[in-house]
Image (cartoon, rainbow, N blue to C red):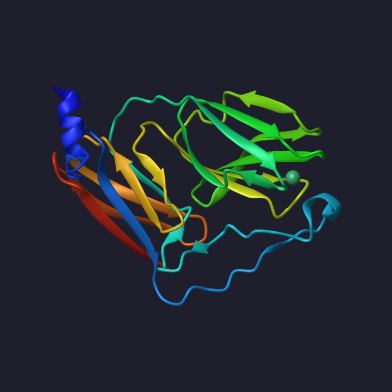
Amino acid sequence: MKKIFMSVCLFLLSCSIALGEENISVIIRYEGVPPKSEPLRVTKDEEFCGKTVPNESLIIGPNGGIRNAMVYLKGVKGEIKEKQFILKNEKCRFSPHVGFALKGGEFLISNEDNMLHNTHAFIIKNKMRRTALNIGLPNKGDKIINKRVFMRPGLIKVECDAHEWMSAWIIVIDHPYAAVTDENGKAEINNVPDGEYEIVVFHETLGEYTKKIKVEAGKITTVEFKMK
Ligand SMILES: [Cu+2]
């Protein structure tokens, strides 16, 4: 029966809800004229890193969509599946630049470059920051797994003490209802149970915005944020 339903759905996109797929569609746009973004200047290890690296602190697409905004729900419970968050030191940047980690999960940090990187993670709370992890990985292929950094939900900023231009942002959450916006400023949060929630968007340069939303079975809830 499900097979027949699936094939009918190939012609009817609206079936996605019935199959338990997307039900919150988010778009994040920049309001006004986007500021000019310059590449980040490399001040050390130029022979490997080059003279500049891409600036990921505010990436705005042609239609004003903001990339790398982090969208998540508050006041919701859900099963956590992915237990490990992987952060690479790669080509003199952190990869991914932003991402969600699940509470209680492992933090795997690796070095893909043939030089020393020093991963320094700070827990950010009430505009204060304190070190949660500070680890040097001197050689290509080095990796460590930490099991303590993601003990509590919240915001984490990662820097490299060897290269001041390197940064990454992680939000630790205790449910799976979260997504990062793509190059068009779009994100989808799927399989959300019916209910009323607060939806939060965090962007490293533009800050945090919230809205109240209602999720109902069989409907796509569309949410738009304008940030500046
Ligand atoms: Cu580094």
Q: In the picture provided, is 131 more to the left or to the right than 34?
A: right
Q: In the picture provided, is 213 more to the left or to the right than 44?
A: left
Q: In the picture provided, is 105 more to the left or to the right than 214?
A: right
Ligand 1, what quadrant?
top right
Picture layout, residue 16 above or below residue 34: above
Is residue 187 visible from the viewing direction of this image? Answer: yes
x and y percentages locating residue 225 in the rendered image: 33, 61
Question: Quadrant of the image for the N terminus?
Answer: top left
x and y percentages locating residue 52 in the rendered image: 74, 61
x and y percentages locating residue 151 in the rendered image: 50, 28
Residue 2 image-quadrant placement: top left
Which residue is at a point 57% across and 43% down the rendered structure image? Answer: 96
Picture layout, residue 148 above or below residue 210: above
Question: Quadrant of the image for the C terminus?
Answer: bottom left
Is residue 18 visible from the viewing direction of this image? Answer: no
Q: How many marks?
A: 0
Residue 22 image-quadrant placement: top left
Residue most extreme to the bottom: 33
Q: Which residue is nearer to you in this view: 99 or 112?
A: 112
Q: Which residue is nearer to you in this view: 120 or 145?
A: 145
Q: Which residue is nearer to you in this view: 198 or 1?
A: 1
